[in-house]
Image (spheres, grey):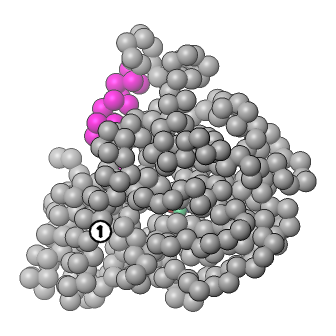
Amino acid sequence: MKKHNFSAGPCILPQEVLLKASAAVMDLDNSGLSLIEISHRSAAFVEVMEKAQSLALELLGLEDKGYKALFLQGGASLQFLMVAYNLMEKKAGYLNTGTWSDKAIKEAKLFGDVVEVGSSKDKNFNYIPKGYSIPSGLDYLHVTSNNTIFGTQIKKFPKTDAPLICDMSSDIFSRQLDFSQFGLIYAGAQKNMGPAGTTLIVVKEEILGKVSRKIPSMLDYQVHIAKDSMFNTPAVFPVYTSMLTLEWLKNLGGIAAIEQVNEKKAQLIYSEIDLSPIFEGFANKEDRSTMNATFNLTDERLKQDFDAMCKEAGVVGINGHRSVGGYRASMYNALSLESVGVLVDIMSEMERKA
Ligand SMILES: *Cc1c(COP(=O)(O)O)cnc(C)c1O
């Protein structure tokens, strides 16, 4: 039985994408060769890379606006340090909204002064700080749009003269935003785009080349831009699969169309959490994520029953992160409204039984 996959990442991908990706592993476009045995310099793969890059820019509405898209390796975690390496001369601002921001801050401190402009650590990151002031003279301001672990999401981004840098790993391509407000966006593929192994970076070229330090080639955005993400061998399978997902999204009607589905899914689960006396949401209501819904049982004695019912229905991947406990239902683009319906039905049946 196909499972209802609520995993936080790696996570669900569209069936259609999995079918096409597995066919390409056997034979890429009737070439008689596998996707993973051809040269990354072959015309066939260069086309894949170019298409993945141009689809990313197109879906974000950033074509012809001075941005470049890159597919690199090292995960979002490498971006924590690459951002600082390439962009921090003296001082950068960070909004601390959880584990991932914390890790980004740790790396940035190796390169200069980090100003934590706001933090929600006081309440175990169950909200998004607001009304904080942003000092002048920052090299950039770094934010995490969606906090995968705690289930909070920035709805309104800070305004600043410094380039705004965003870790968008767990909600890229999920909602409409003015993406031109960002100087650089990065996202590990495995949350909303493809398999683990590649990271999308979308960067406005004019913010680069301003720091005085020397940058090792593999960590230098400008080197990767000059070589079109082919400075070294790219992760061919993750890039190909990401391209397929972006194509799938475009055919659905792009971000505008998927946003509507994502909102319906979120409304469905949050209204159950809010109405039910046996469940309690973790994140502050106005900051709740449309991607990762975090919640707890109000009575731990119900856990065994609830878990058994989920298992029976093929609902998987809803255990909360160890730093929060409870449950987390991740509802990325490829997860259907129907799957959320299955989980919500279990939740309401549990309430009747309790
Ligand atoms: C998962 C995640 C990361 C880490 O990604 P890796 O690709 O494993 O390095 C960073 N930031 C956010 C917001 C994430 O959800």
Question: Eyeballing the image, is 352 above or below 85?
Answer: below
Residue matched to label 1: 266
Residue in the picture at 55% in, 29% down: 50
Q: Is residue 87 left or right of residue 353?
A: right
Residue 314 colored in magenta in the image? no
Please state which of residues 132 and 342 is positioned toward the viewer in this rendering: 132
Question: Eyeballing the image, is 43 above or below 333?
Answer: above
Does residue 118 appear anywhere in the picture? yes
- Based on the displayed image, in which of its 4 quarters is residue 70 positioned? top right
* Amino acid, disc 1: Ala
The x and y percentages for residue 21 are 38, 31
> Of helix, strand and loop, which one carries label 1?
helix
- Based on the displayed image, in which of its 4 quarters is residue 309 positioned? bottom left
Residue in the picture at 49% in, 49% down: 60
**Type of secondary structure dominating the magenta stretch:** helix
The x and y percentages for residue 312 are 15, 61
Does residue 77 appear anywhere in the picture? no
Q: Is residue 13 left or right of residue 269?
A: right
**Label 1: few (<14), some (14–19) or many (≥20) C-alpha neighbours in 10 Å:** many
| Residue at the outermost top position | 32
Please identify the quadrant where the C terminus is shown: bottom left
The x and y percentages for residue 183 are 66, 56
The x and y percentages for residue 83 are 71, 56
In which quadrant of this rendering is ligand 1 seen? bottom right
Magenta-highlighted residues? 10-26
